[in-house]
Image (cartoon, rainbow, N blue to C red):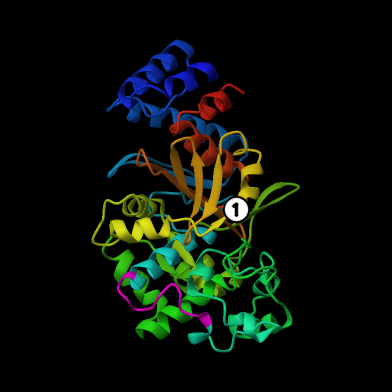
Amino acid sequence: MKFLSLWSSFLPRRRRDRLRCLLAALCGAWLPVCVAGDVDASARNFDRYFHQLVKKQDIPGAAYVIVDGDRVVAMNTYGVRVKGKRGRINRNTVFRLASVSKTFAGSMAAVLEHEKKFSWGDRVVRYVPELSFKTPALSRQLQVQHLLSHSSGLTPNAYDNYLEDNKPLSKILPQFANIDPRCKPGNCYGYQNVLFSLIEDVIYKATGVTYERQLKERFFVPLKMKDASLGWESFMASNNRAAPHVQTGRGWRPVTVRKEYYLAAPAAGVNASISDMAQWLKAQMGYYPRVLSPEVIQDITTERVETQRHMRHRIWRDYLTHAGYGLGWRLYTMGDDRIIYHGGWVAGFRAAVAYSEKQKIGIAILMNAESRVIADLTANFVIDITGNGALSTAMTR
């Protein structure tokens, strides 16, 4: 099967797709992205796989959407908003997006940068003068683009523990005077939440408009993301919100919605429903050019730094030929295609969004539980749409 999949990759796309559909029929496997019209049948098979895994893991609630071009081919929900209660997850149930929020921040900043409100090469201290490293001269090397690409050079997740203790950024920033970058900014990767969120100050000082208002006026309203919002207060104000759940010895247990990472709003503060995520996928794939122009999309998906250690992940390692980070997006090369991807995980929620740059097929998954099953679902789907057949293998286990 692997040999046939590899051999078929050398055929023209339409012939390759027909061959994969034939193989699916012969082998009983799930091979998505068949000829036009068959993607709907493929989505139905993913739906069975989705329900199989979330039921096996006893996930309280989840939702997914699959988008092909500008068309939603599948959207489904599972379970309840709060375990032990009757309220069901539906298409408008709001989840925390956690670090998938970074895709909004990177995109928003890129829109404004292309409007000449600021430049990627601007020094961060121009907008956040209170930021200083142990060696003060090094703080002047940090550029706006380094914030959004996690290429500040600092140790990964610097001072995230302060966020988890519910401290605001104003109380955390002085701590950076105690450390220096491990490398020159722009030269190495180190995932950040605190520094990433400084883009909020950049946007406000460059435009005079708050980050929250920019998101609403530039993204949520024109894209008709009717359930989307920013922040803890907005999340709690929704009557149709999913509760966070953590795993205990007796299974999943609902917990209080914590503010912590909401204090780093660009990094982890967006809330949205699965219907909203369908719109966000379409925009990212280029189907709302008045919101996200082709130039902006190209900019945010241009690699700023390599992230080679991600190629060693158990799910991806057999498929990736390169891994990097753009502006709020992970960039995974698989053969002649790229997967534009980001995941999120915070205090009882998981989220993931990914799409094939070449085939314009994407998926978003939201869960109100801290389950790793979301990584398997997302990775197997995107690996399969690039022709590697991972999902067909997974479904036969």
Say whether residue 2 is visible.
yes
Q: Residue at x 61, y 65 (%)?
A: 256
Question: In x, y percent, where is residue 394?
Answer: 57, 27
Question: In x, y percent, where is residue 388?
Answer: 50, 28
Q: Main secondary structure of the magenta part?
A: loop
Is residue 121 part of the magenta span, yes or no? yes
Q: Amino acid at mark 1?
A: Thr
Along the viewing direction, whichever of 387 and 274 lies nearer the viewer: 387
Label 1 element class: loop
Question: In x, y percent, where is residue 23?
Answer: 43, 15
On the image, numbered disc 1 is attached to which residue?
Answer: 307
Q: Please indicate whether residue 11 sits to the left or right of residue 7 in the image.
A: left
Q: Residue at x 40, y 43 (%)?
A: 362
Image: magenta residue range: 114-124
Q: Quadrant of the C terminus?
A: top right
Say whether residue 238 is visible.
no
Q: Residue furthest left?
A: 290
Q: Residue furthest bottom?
A: 130
